[in-house]
Amino acid sequence: ANSVELRVPFLDKEVIKTGLAIRPELKVLKKDGYYEDGYYERKYILRKAAKGLIPPEILWKEKKAMQYGTGVQKVLDRLARDSGFSKKQESHIEKYLMQIASEKGFEFVNN
């Protein structure tokens, strides 16, 4: 039998305790003395720990939202358009996903 196992290492209790014990200035490094307007390096201590283990072009790569970095956004956009949802419609992907969920029997309550 085949299966998929979800693993979330950053939610491990020991990882969380270690992360909370690290000083904030080691997690986010100031660039040019600023934290705002993108002048900082996220996950600095993790990147520094991985230096020499991971190629620099990956190690220091700018962060992208998961849906863009993995290509999921493009696939969802294409599926929504193939199902008749126009890209010009506001939230066309969300509407497409809601339709699918509704067809599968999920109910939603608007707050």
Image (spheres, helix red, strand yellow):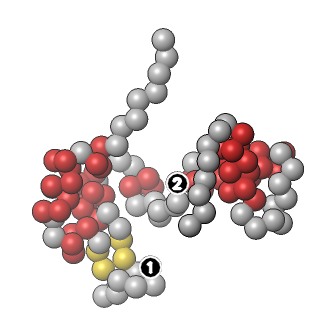
The local secondary structure at tag 2 comes to helix
- Mark 2 or 1: in front is 2
- The answer to whether residue 76 shows anywhere in this view is no
Q: Which residue is mark 2?
A: 66
Q: Residue at x 39, y 49 (%)?
A: 55
**Residue 71, x across and y down, in percent:** 63, 49
- The answer to whether residue 41 shows anywhere in this view is yes
- The total of numbered circles placed on residues is 2
Q: Out of 100 and 48, give the one closest to the viewer.
A: 100
**Residue 82, x across and y down, in percent:** 84, 45
Residue 75 vs residue 68: left or right?
right
Three-letter residue code for mark 1: Gly
**Residue 35, x across and y down, in percent:** 35, 83
Q: CA distance from mark 2 to mark 1?
A: 19 Å
Q: Are marks 2 and 1 in contact (CB under 8 Å)?
A: no
Residue 58 vs residue 45: left or right?
right
Three-letter residue code for mark 2: Met
Q: Residue at x 67, y 37 (%)?
A: 104
Q: Which mark is residue 38?
A: 1
Q: Quadrant of residue 29?
A: bottom left
Looking at the image, the residue that sits furthest to the top is 1
Residue 5, placed above or below residue 48: above
